[in-house]
Image (spheres, rainbow, N blue to C red):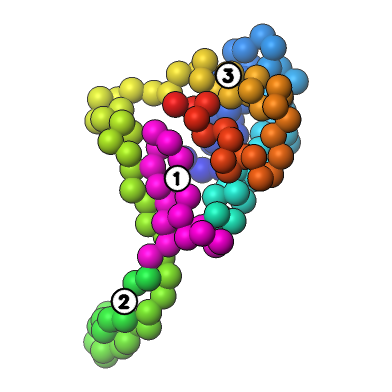
Amino acid sequence: MTKVQMIGDLQARLMKEANSNRYATKAYLEKVVDHIFDVIKDDLLTTGRTCIPNIGTFRVKLARKRRVRDPRTAQLITIPEHKVVKFTPTKPLKIDVAEGRRLHDARWAEFFRYRDRVGLSHSTWGHGFSHMLV
């Protein structure tokens, strides 16, 4: 799913909710999506790990140095050690994907009501909202 598709999907889900129409603008949803991605990226850069309950864990891993063959020249080249981001899905997510289940719209509505009530800031996004999507 691309960022544009994600924003469109969020907008469609929010338009179904009677009380959430004021948050259904694409500009607002784009800021929300950007903010979520920024929090994930910041956590990865500072701690090397970001866990989203019932979704999975993003973690930074050091990829070892290795030798590979360049397909154009058939010459052996060395790729130095570098950091890569790995994702490990949770068991409930694996089961939901295998069975074709979707996240209920009511969970998103509950998340937005919670966000408004609490007044989430940047530091709270990463640690205080993910339990709402369970």
Residue 17, visible in the rendered structure: yes
* Residue visible at 31% across and 76% down in the picture: 64
The type of residue carrying mark 2 is Arg
* Residue visible at 58% across and 43% down in the picture: 126
Q: Give the range drawn in magenta.
A: 44-61
**Distance of label 3 from label 1 (alpha carbons):** 20 Å
Residue 73, visible in the rendered structure: no
Residue carrying label 2? 64
Q: Which mark is residue 51?
A: 1
- Give residue 127's position: percent from left, percent from top: 56, 40
Residue situated in front as seen by the camera: 71 or 38: 38
- Give residue 72's position: percent from left, percent from top: 30, 82
Residue situated in front as seen by the camera: 116 or 118: 118
Residue carrying label 3? 110
Label 1, residues with CA under 10 Å away: few <14, some 14-19, many ≥20: many
* Residue visible at 42% across and 62% down in the picture: 60
The type of residue carrying mark 1 is Cys
Left/right placement of residue 72 relative to residue 122 reads: left
- Labels 1, 2: front one: 1
